[in-house]
Amino acid sequence: MLGLAVGLVYVVSGTLEQHIIQIGDKSPAFAVVTESGKKLSPESFGGKLLIVNFWASWCEPCRTEMPSLELMAERHARDGLRVWTVNHKETAAAIDRFLALMPIGLPILRDADGAASRAWGVRMFPTTVFIGRDGQPLCTWTGEVDWQAPAARQQVQQLLRHGRL
């Protein structure tokens, strides 16, 4: 089922206060590491629509969702859509074992200490965040999404065309 929310929750560091990220807010600052050790942040792809998918190899819905996410990324690459898969706190060896069982072509970035997941308030996997060309969050999906389903395809098309839902 496609769950859509217009806000994201994250815990402000050092307090128990929660802040709802509203449409139009800036994305929380975070950096993740590529397989080659390069640090990337959303600013690395300025001007492009970015999808950030938080996942873990032990998460069955994450594994189920991955092929349709990859197909969606391939379908919209020439539209300027970029997709990052951000692995939550797993070792490179665990990711390699996952890739041996399920080879995918999406970039897999490591959130080794969980800081990116915490910054976005990710509490459930998978969580997928759309970040607009201006670096602002557009929406989030929590839980497994079939990116080939008509409802998901329609919403992705709308985001690509209008930058909002």
Image: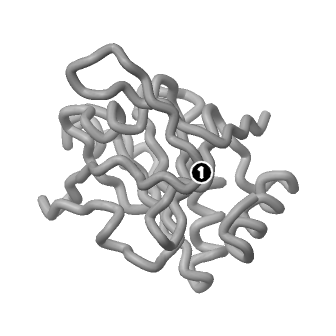
- Residues 118 and 6: in front is 6
Question: As displayed, is residue 19 above or below residue 100?
Answer: above
Place of residue 39 in the rendered image (x, y in percent of width and height, measured from the top left):
17, 60
Q: Nearer the viewer, residue 106 or 98?
A: 106
Residue appearing at x 26%, y 41% in the figure: 111
Residue name at image x 55 percent, y 56 percent: 24
Q: Residue at x 44, y 64 (%)?
A: 135
Q: Is residue 75 above or below residue 18?
A: below
What kind of colouring is applied to the model shown?
A: one colour
The quarter in which the N terminus is drawn is: top right
In the displayed structure, would residue 129 be above or below residue 77?
A: above
Q: Quadrant of residue 35 in the image?
A: bottom left
The residue at the far bottom in this view is 78
Helix, strand or loop at mark 1: loop
Residue visible at 21% across and 20% down in the picture = 14
Image position, residue 30 (x, y; %): 27, 49
Image spot of residue 149 (x, y percent): 82, 52
The amino acid type found where label 1 is placed reads Ile
* Total numbered circles: 1
In the picture, residue 18 is in which quadrant?
top left
Rendered-image quadrant of the C terminus: bottom right
Q: Which residue is mark 1?
A: 23
In the rendered image, the residue lying farthest to the top is 16
Looking at the image, residue 100 sits to the left or right of residue 92; the answer is: right
Label 1 crowding class (10 Å Cα cut-off): few <14, some 14-19, many 20+?
A: some
Q: Residue furthest left?
A: 37
- Estimate the x, y position of residue 11 in percent, counting from the top left: 36, 25
